[in-house]
Amino acid sequence: MDIKALENSLKRQVISPVYLFYGDETYLRDQYLEKFKSLLPDECRDFNMDIIDGRDTALEPIINMATTLPFLADKRLVIVKNAEFFKAKRKNQKKGDKGEKDEAAGDKPDMSEDILIGYLENPVDSTCLIFCTDSVDRKRKIYKRIEKNGQVVQFAPLKGRDLTEWINRTARKLGKTIEPAAAAGLVTAAGNNLHQLRTELEKLACYSESSAITAADVEMMVSKTAELSIFELVDAVGDRNYSKAIRLAREMVFLGEPVIRILYMVARQCRLLLQAKSLLETGVSARETAGLMQVHPFVAQKCIGQAGNFTSGELKSSLEKILETDADIKGGKQEAVLALELLIIALCEEQK
């Protein structure tokens, strides 16, 4: 089940007895958890809802909660956060850790898992049991059992059109519209973290005096992230302007961005430029490039423009130099900031 299907089922009040919510997009997940809570009558919600931490609670008490009948209501809601028992089991566990102790005590984790699997074979209709975790192992029996008898919903970070639609929807809820260029600039400046985007949209809605949020509003109000600075840094490198590129890198370091992460982001940008260049050379249109690169159209357009400043050979050579610098810093051969600045000078040099 995808998020849109989940939304439609909630509107029709078709509720599964068991759900597994997983993924990194916790803001969107928590919004849907609130929608499930709102299905319970206000006057008896406290009697019919349990929210527990799966790290601190064994499976047996969770099943006991799930099998308890609702009080003066049609449904009970049991939410298990940090349900880590859906993750892949660790390999090569050290002697004496919790996993080995449980194993020595008679394979207790598997016995607990069997209890849950038994419940999932015939879940109680009057209870809605929701497990939440950041990642899952699809090979595990409990995952397959929920997939068969319940609903599995992945909450992955929104991208492309889905992210743009979410921004437009959120802006309308705040009583505003947002121009396409402003939405693109907001994503570039703030990334795709929905919590941060919501905060920025609230500020923009208060700041903008007109009914529409403009690109100028975004430029004025939204703080730049490291990703936006990387665009500017790569632009400077593409212009062979090493002094500007070094100034931008120093600003990022001053603002707390680790040098290794700057290297990673520059390498990522070089790979995107190389990908954009390769796609264009094979005859792919600029419009199709964004979809194939799996990035926001605004980001793809920037990459297409920047790719023209480099040859494919230069981009490949740049990636090799970044890798060498990363190894030198981690190996203690060079001081981090100095190594970064020497790398920028090397990237700005005309390569033959």
Image (cartoon, rainbow, N blue to C red):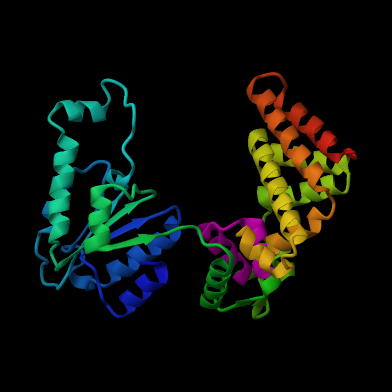
- Magenta span contains residue 180: no
Q: Residue at x 81, y 51 (%)?
A: 235
**Dividing the image into 4 quarters, which one contains the C terminus?**
top right
In this rendering, the count of numbered labels is: 0
Relative to 341, residue 20 above or below: below
Residue 20 drawn at (x, y percent):
30, 57
- Magenta span contains residue 192: yes
Q: Which residues are magenta?
A: 182-205
Relative to 200, residue 170 above or below: below
Q: Residue at x 20, y 65 (%)?
A: 17
Main SS type for the magenta part? helix
242 to the left or right of 47: right
Residue 212 lies in quadrant: bottom right
6 to the left or right of 169: left
Look at the image and tell me whether residue 19 can be seen.
yes
Residue 107 lies in quadrant: top left
Relative to 109, residue 53 above or below: below
98 to the left or right of 298: left
